[in-house]
Image (spheres, grey):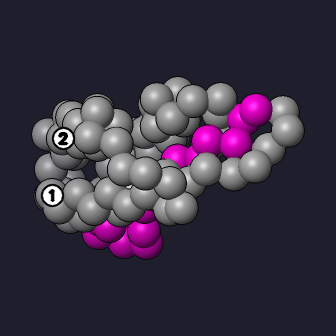
Amino acid sequence: MTINIQYVQMPTSESMSAIVTNKLNKLSNKYDWIIKADVFFKLENDPSGSGKICEIQLSAPGPRLFAKSSQDNFEKAAATTIKELENQLRKRKETFKKY
């Protein structure tokens, strides 16, 4: 699986890249038919403090999977987004036909 991480209008973070890459690799070991992951970290001006956004788009057989979350820090946003994607992957795997 190929992982592309982009930081939109903010400085890059090696530690965040390492955390997300590690979690996505675990996901790809469980679901080996994932082709590519595009990760976007965005910083939004939000007065409530939850303007740290993580968006992940997965390329897999069938329609693309997409999840987005906004939290008060990027680690929580990434964890929530990956959990949402895992639920979507589990549902997609159930629809596969077994021959």
The residue lying toward the viewer, choosing from 33 and 21, is 21
On screen, residue 47 above or below 7: above
Q: Residue 34: where, in percent of width, then height?
A: 23, 57
Q: Residues within 10 Å of mark 2 (few under 14, many from 20)?
A: some
- Which residue is rendered at x = 50% and y = 41% of the image? 81
If you read the primary sequence from the N terminus, does the residue marked by circle 2 or circle 1 appear first? Answer: 1
Q: Relative to residue 51, is residue 83 drawn left or right? A: left
- Which residue is rendered at x = 32% and y = 67% of the image? 59
> Mark 2 belongs to which amino acid?
Asn
The residue lying toward the viewer, choosing from 65 and 15, is 15
Could you tell me if residue 99 is visible in this image?
yes
- Which residue is rendered at x = 57% and y = 30% of the image? 73
The residue lying toward the viewer, choosing from 15 and 37, is 15
* Range of magenta residues: 49-67
Residue 65 in magenta stretch: yes
Q: Residue 20: where, in percent of width, then height?
A: 31, 39
Which quarter of the rendering shows the C terminus? bottom left
In 3D space, how far apart are the residues under numbered discs 2 and 1 (Cα atoms)? 8 Å
Mark seen at residue 25: 2
Q: Relative to residue 10, is residue 13 drawn left or right? A: left
On screen, residue 83 above or below 38: above
Q: Are marks 2 and 1 in contact (CB under 8 Å)?
A: yes
- Which residue is rendered at x = 43% and y = 72% of the image? 63
Mark seen at residue 1: 1
Q: Residues within 10 Å of mark 1 (few under 14, many from 20)?
A: some
Q: Residue 13: where, in percent of width, then height?
A: 34, 42
> Mark 1 belongs to which amino acid?
Met
Secondary element under disc 2, as helix, strand or loop, is helix
Quadrant of res 14? top left
Could you tell me if residue 55 is visible in this image?
no
> How many numbered circles does the render carry?
2
